[in-house]
Image (cartoon, rainbow, N blue to C red):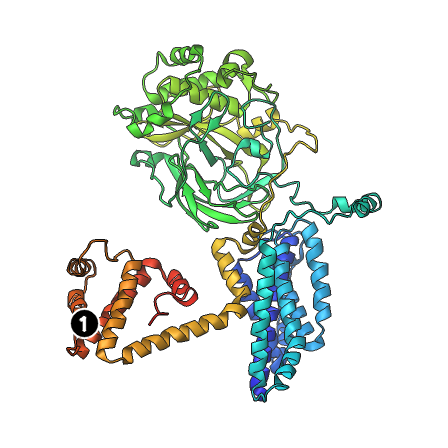
Amino acid sequence: MAAEQFDIDRKIRLTIIFVMSAAMATALIQGLGYIVPGFFARSLYVLLFLALYTVIHYFPLVSIIFPLLLTAVVTIFFWNTPLLIAKITPLFIMPQPSDSLFWPLATILAITLFHYLVVFKFKNTLILLIAGLFAFIPLWYLYVDSAYPSAIFYTTSWLMLISYERGAGIWVRAVKSKKEVKDLSEMRQSWLTYTSIILSVAIFTTLILPKEIAPLPFPRLHIWVNQNLTFLKNLRTTDDPDIRGDGGDFDLFTFGFEEGAILGGPLYQDDKVMLEVTGKGGFYLQGTFRDYYTGQNWINSSEFIEGSDFNKPKEIMDNYLSETELTIRHIRLRTRTVFSIPFPAEISQLPGIMLKDRHGGIVMSQSIPLYYEYSVNGHYLAYRTNFSLLEEESGIPETIHNYLRLPVSLPERVHKLAYELTADTDGYYAKIKAIETYLRNNYTYTTELPSLPENRDFVDFFLFDLKEGYCTAFASALAIMGRAAGIPTRYVVGFIIPESPSTGGKYRIAGSNAHAWVEGYIPGIGWLPFEATPGFRTTDDLPLARNQPYHDFSIAPDGDFRIATARSRELLDFEDNYYPEFSTIDNSVDSISFLKGLVRVLIAATVITLLIIGIFIYRRYKYVKKKIRNMKSKEPRQKIVAFYNLSLQLLDRIVLGKIAGETPLEYSRRIKRDVHSWTLNFATISEEVSVALYSKDEVSEDLAHQAEMFFFHIFDRYLAQVGKVTAFIEILIQGRYFTSY
């Protein structure tokens, strides 16, 4: 019994050490500036180190491995000194690349060892509390967002340890005073279950309470604090001042690029890194699409619906596309918009449900957590040709007509200018290239754009009055004049990935890389990008595809867009109070950020509440198994009714339930058609159930067995259709289907 108690005690302590070590390591690794390993990777590393320390604790002779390793290192040093130096030196060069694994592993190893020694060697929980305070509070005030959820995990585990060490003894003594207790180990476990429930209720109640709670009404105290403790005002606010965006759809004005949602006004640039991209550079990174022009701004008139399929580029474009894969990481940009390449094929590792609009814009159901990364696979336009030769004469599909809409109030001279520019050209591609060329050669790039006057159309104001502007003006003019010439267009905002990566091989996308451009629909080809802003590269700057005819549209060379950008888009100084206040994001967003996605949040929540619901789920599992065994052991009359009714519930769950007004015979025939089985006859089983319910005739064991087999057949189909995770939740957590039998 003593050995069993010791085993249980060690398991509980190791579980608490595991959670505390993983929580503290996550925040510290991010605070050191390294990419935090994934949830499963972190868990595996902590478990491996815990296993190593436990083995050394029970088998001290194992520690002889370390002197042997040191001997091997010394041997290598004298045998091949340059090799050893070349391997070890890079590990201690600071700073390491952000994706380095050495220092994160070293951090996890040290933190796990610290908690192991404190819990098993020093046995002092006060040290753990002090360590948590010194770790999480500074990290939180340094805007390490994962410090908040990590502190919750850490505090919960610490309270569990305190309760286990101090409260269990009191619990056992209290129970023993009332009755004789033989199994003290079982009593300690019951106390731990009770504590887990109380802690979970308290913590989850705290998490769901409103966070914007006003201070206590002590005005004199507040005045004294403001006068004597002025440093308190400089502590962490609700948002990092370097974070841009409000968590909604991405647009240029959401992080200060433009003055507001209305087009026009000066250009405010930002050199803060918004995104970090791994892969290839030199092309557009699509953000959001706009199709409806009001005369003052662009609006997306399409609704977002759930979907994960993407339109494939037409085969005729195969010679001009190149395949690539990008990993996109949100650094300081808070948005629900998913950025992608021009022709995406697959987007993976998203933190939730993906929603799409008819333009191809992609968003999540909620804001993408900061420091979260996802992968985009697909194609981008890598080669040029005279796309006019690839056009079809079939005209514009009816589904594209929406992209020809123009405001009724659009001045006539805009229509006239578009007609004059395209009158001598044939084909959609040639017409929009003519407009693109005209804008690039006759208008000037500037960041000093005045605000739009009242009752003026922005495109008209830009074309005939200003004749200078930045990307939003050029893109708007190209899109609207293109529509006036009969070419479907849409307005796109996103970023331009630089040609060359930054240090570490990653492309750091700053606010100054934000851009607006146009996509035009060319019959037979599809959507192609067009660039009217001077100083930015067009498709004419791409390499010519081999053996492909090409006609030069005589566009003046613009040079490398990065150089042009640096010259013409100088960073403007702006006041500290320029940026609008960001709406407060619920703390659950930080939890999602820490756990890298909604799915991992559920997994991590399971880890937190494992002590709470573990016993419950195990007992429910045993209950279900017992129910099935009891149903199998029933006499045939009861057995066939039980399995039949259970099958009906599962059939209803997989949308094969009985339709209103449908007779039992009709229903049984439909199920026989939809549920294919050569050995099981649902109609016969249904008839025999009627016999079992309303007749005294005997029910054969064979038919009862068929009802049992039919249930398991439907159960397998239920698992395949709803998924094992959903089935787990419905049966073992919600208690559906088996509770009434």
Q: Position of residue 340 (x, y in %)?
A: 45, 40
Q: Quadrant of the C terminus?
A: bottom left
Where does label 1 land, which residue?
A: 694
Which quadrant holds residue 239? top right
Which quadrant holds residue 117? bottom right
Q: Position of residue 497 (x, y in %)?
A: 52, 37
Q: Position of residue 211 (x, y in %)?
A: 63, 49
Looking at the image, can residue 64 be seen?
no
In the image, residue 672 above or below residue 211: below
Which quadrant holds residue 272? top right
Q: Amino acid at mark 1?
A: Tyr
In the image, residue 674 above or below residue 256: below
Q: Quadrant of the N terminus?
A: bottom right
Is 581 or 436 nearer to us in this picture? 581
Give me the residue at 33% from left, 23% from top.
388
* Number of numbered discs visible in the structure rendering: 1
